[in-house]
Amino acid sequence: MLKQHPQSQFPRWSFVKHRLPSLLWLTSAALLTACGGGGGGGMMPGTSMSNGGSTTQACSNCGTAVVSLTDAPGDFISYPVKVVSLQLTRSDGTVVQTVPATTQVDFAQLVDLSEIISADLIASGQYVSASMTLDYSGTTIVVDNGTATPAMITGNNIINGATSMPLVAPNSQMTLTLMLDSNHRLVITPHVVANLALDFDLAASNTIAPSDTKPMTVTVNPILTASLVPDVTKQIRVRGPLVSVDASASSFIIGVRPFYNANGTNGQLTVNTTSTTTYAINGTNYTGSAGLTELAMSAAGTMIVAYGSWDTTTQTFTASSVLAGSSVPGTMHDSLTGIVISRSGDSLTVARGLIERWQLEDMEFSRQTTVSVGSGTTVTEQGQSGSFTIADISVGQQIQASGTFGAAGSGTPTLDATAGSVQLVPTTVSGTVTSTGTNLVTLDLQYIDRFAASNFNFAGTGTTTAQDATASAYTVAVPPALTSAGALTANTPAQFTGFVAPFGAAPPDFNALSLTNYANTTAQLQLGWLSGYAMPFSTLSSTELLISQTALQASNWHVIRIGFETIDPSTLTSGLQLVPDTTAANQFFIIAHRSSWMLDSYSTFADFVTALTSDLTGTTEVEQLSARGPYAAGVLSAYAIEVLLSD
């Protein structure tokens, strides 16, 4: 049966004894190992040129490698780590440095986003590996414990899983090397764009160990996967200085300068625009050609952030939303990204804030920040055209605010945005449907952007006090285009993305732009036997794995997660059936051998089962199993299965 995550516990964490070795997963595209040192061969720096047919320097034997970085979700609000370098190694041993400057990345912010971190022209050839060096020095990891006061983990409590030593200087760095599968190597050909999409899996890479007697720890066993095709289900962001605008081609070129870097570029990228692309330029809103015309008047070097999508057929990037100049967070003003948990007049209380101070290549986390707005505050809505004011900022809205931070002190930080700006960012609300009507859904609200609804004070959100939003009856306006909303029935889970209704204007409480259909949402299965289990499968064939209820009940942890809800598989009297998801574009099945640290990858379910049958002989036991794919009525259609064996 479905149930909510209990807020008084740590519902999504997996607890693994430190005596177990680190587990590194092999995907169909890449193998990650943690090692010391860098790659060999001669060093060939990446060049800084543009793609999409717009080059600034001749390179007859070069193609463009567009490298993006994203993250699978984990139980973290902030996970800032420095990326010291990202190198690609060619089959002849030549090494290309694609991220020449140390870049601070908050991986927790990449759960619903992919960031383009490099778009360099590099010499043609087959590239067989990618090495990324991470530096944890000075890192503060913020753990989501389901409360308004998340746990903050620092210094000696962040542990290298391979050495069991703290990730502090002089041992604060980890170098991760992905050996690309021989059938899925990064092939660079002259004048052609190729993609390498990296995914840092926070949930699988970190074990959180809370304790009543000693500080909480995070043990890091990095897991990175790679694909030659970007994840088109996520929005893509590119950041950097403006190079030029081509109004006739409805495009512009920026130098790629990801995340918080203040200097340098990692290649150049052509950004295409359309008649519906929205712009916020120095605090003023534009749409379509008017925005591109205004952008053309900006000086070269003006900071740009573009959000959009990647076309895998044409290998081009098209922006749906563009920020420029002072509208870019952290540019010319201090900035804060967070969620509004209450509002009183022109004062906002913003929780889970990420602070960027102007001209600093750094950020910090704030549990709560007080933001002042006024008639001089410019308000925009990401991806939406129209005129907006501070009245559009309401409780539950995710925002990016720019202004001036008050003097540092021991109290709650303050940001004065009365002469600054606030951008409203698409926000998600999740809950259980209690009723439906014409273009309206009522939820028993559980989360707003993965933050428990109990943390929000909805006073003032309604046209009257009696109509203030309430978590138990949270109303969502659903446009007619979302026809699947008609299939929603009482007691079913639902998640909507959109914008909170203006302050003092509810109901409805929320205006949806999109709906997540939980029938197609990927389920995540996690099972673990600390002492191993000899044969958890009552059926082991080329078409299915059937995990017996006895084995499920014997596991030390067992959970299926679908969105914000969980299923306890040990209650399935007939056991849990795993079958291959034949509709998935990419499938990978992995067997990991604990004692030898060898990982075997299979692209077909049948080959995987044949090898698993052969491996489960003698004293070999299963210690962990995870799987991903659609789930219904005791059957998980898996496009990915990973098994850790004791041998």
Image (cartoon, rainbow, N blue to C red):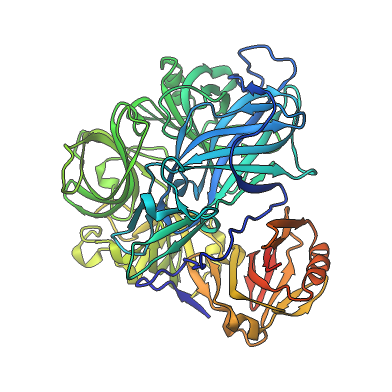
Image-based side of 189 in relation to 512, left or right: right
Whole-percent x, y for residue 222 in the image: 55, 51
* Res 311 visible: no
In the image, residue 257 lies at what x, y percent?
Answer: 48, 28
In front of the other: 328 or 362: 362
242 is higher (above) or lower (below) than 91: above
Residue 254, how many percent across, how many down? Answer: 51, 23
Does residue 492 appear to the left or right of 451 in the view shown? right
Q: Quadrant of residue 99?
A: top right
Left or right of 144: which side holds 91? right
Q: Nearer the viewer, residue 297 or 200?
A: 200
Q: Nearer the viewer, residue 618 or 499?
A: 618
Looking at the rendered image, the quarter that the C terminus falls into is bottom right
Which residue lies at the image location 63% right of the left edge and 88% below the top edge?
573
Q: Look at 74% across and 70% down and name the residue there.
A: 579
Residue drawn at point x = 69 percent, y = 52 percent = 27
Where residue 242 appears, as percent x and y from the top left, is 47, 20
Q: Quadrant of residue 137?
A: top left
Q: Is residue 404 above or below residue 367?
A: above
* Residue 148 in view here: yes
| Quadrant of res 642 | bottom right
Q: Is residue 324 left or right of residue 401?
A: right
